[in-house]
Amino acid sequence: MIKKIIKNSYDLNISVLIEKADQAKGLAIILHGLGGFKEQGHIATFAEAFKESGYTVLRFDATNSFNESEGQFEEASVTKHYQDLEDVIAWAKKQDWYIEPFVLVGHSLGGIAILLYTLNFPEQVKAVAPISTVVSGKLRLEAYKMFLGEEHVKAWQKTGWYEYESFSKPGLIKRLPWSHMEDNLKYDILTKADELKLPVLLIVGEHDTSTPFTHQQMLYEKLPGPKALYIIKGAAHTFYDQEYLAEIKQIFKNWIKKI
C-alpha cells in the first residue's frame, strides 16, 4: 500500500492511496461521495473486490471533505469533485502502474463524477460502477424536497445553508451552502446516457432517500450497453452493515469477471 500527496488544479493537497497488484489485470479508480473519505466501509469494500480480482486499485480523498485532503466542506460541489477526479487521473497516467482503459467506481457524488468523466473520455474507461449515484441535479432536488420537506428546502435556499449531522462521523455537523445545489443543477446524466455503451453496474439501497431506486431505474433504462441494477434490501444511501457490504462485494466480484 502506497500513500501519496499530490496537488490538484486549485493547488490543494489530495491524499491518494495505491494498492499495486503483481501482474495486474487492470486498474480500478474509486471515488467517495459528498463529505466522504477513502477508508469508508463501502469504499474499502469496492477496493477489496478489485484487489481480490487481481487489479491495482487507486482510491483518494477528494478535496473539500472531512478527510486527509485539503479544502472546506462548504466548497464541495459536483464540479470540484469531478475536477479532482480529472487531476488524479492525469497524475496516475505518469505512474509506472497505470493501465488504460481502467474501471471507474464512485459512490453518490462520486458516481456522477465518474459518469461525467466517462462521457468526456470514453476511450479511457473500460467499465463504470456508479453506486447510489446522483443522476441529475433536478432529480436530487426533488429527492431533497421529499425527505427533508418543501419548507426545509425553501429555508435552505433562503438562508443559504443546510446543516445536518454526519452518519460516518457522529457529532460532526456539516454545513452545505445552497450554491452546492445550484452547481448540481447544471448536470443531468440522463441527457447523454445513451452514449454510455460500456458495461455499467448500478447498486442502490432499498431505503435510499437521496438517490432512490426510481432514479437509478431511470438511468438504467437509458443505458444502451451491458448493464446491471441491484437493490440491497434494508440498506439506505450509505452501506454500513457488514451483511450489506458482503453482498455488495460479491456483486462486484461477479461483475468484474464479466468485464
Image (tube, helix red, strand yellow):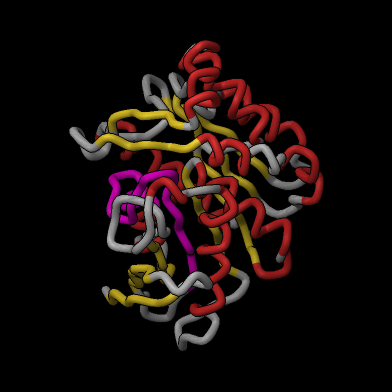
Measured as percent of width and height from the top left, residue 126 is found at 63, 63
Q: Residue at x 32, y 77 (%)?
A: 4
Q: Nearer the viewer, residue 111 or 129?
A: 111
Was residue 1 drawn as part of the magenta stretch in this picture?
no
- Which residue is the extreme one toward the left? 171
245 sits left or right of 176 in the view: left
Image location (x, y in percent) of residue 103: 55, 61
Q: Which corner quadrant of the image does residue 243 belong to?
A: top left
* Residue 88 in sight from this viewpoint: no
Residue 226 percent coordinates (x, y): 70, 46
The quarter holding residue 6 reads bottom left
On the picture, is 7 further left or further right than 222? left
- Give the extent of the magenta segment: 25-46
Residue depicted at 32% across the width and 39% down the height: 245
Residue 215, picture quadrant: top right
Q: Nearer the viewer, residue 257 or 179?
A: 179
Residue 184 lies, with reference to residue 234, above or below; the image says below
Task: Tell me the quadrant of the picture where the N terminus can be found.
Answer: bottom left
Decide if residue 25 is in sight here.
yes
The answer to whether residue 179 is above or below residue 139 is below
Q: Which quadrant would the C terminus be assigned to in this image?
A: bottom right
Residue 192 x %, y %: 79, 45
Rendered residue at 70%/54% (across/down): 198
Left/right of residue 248 with respect to residue 189 in the rendered view: left
Q: How many numbered circles does the render carry?
A: 0
Pick the residue in front: 75 or 60.
75
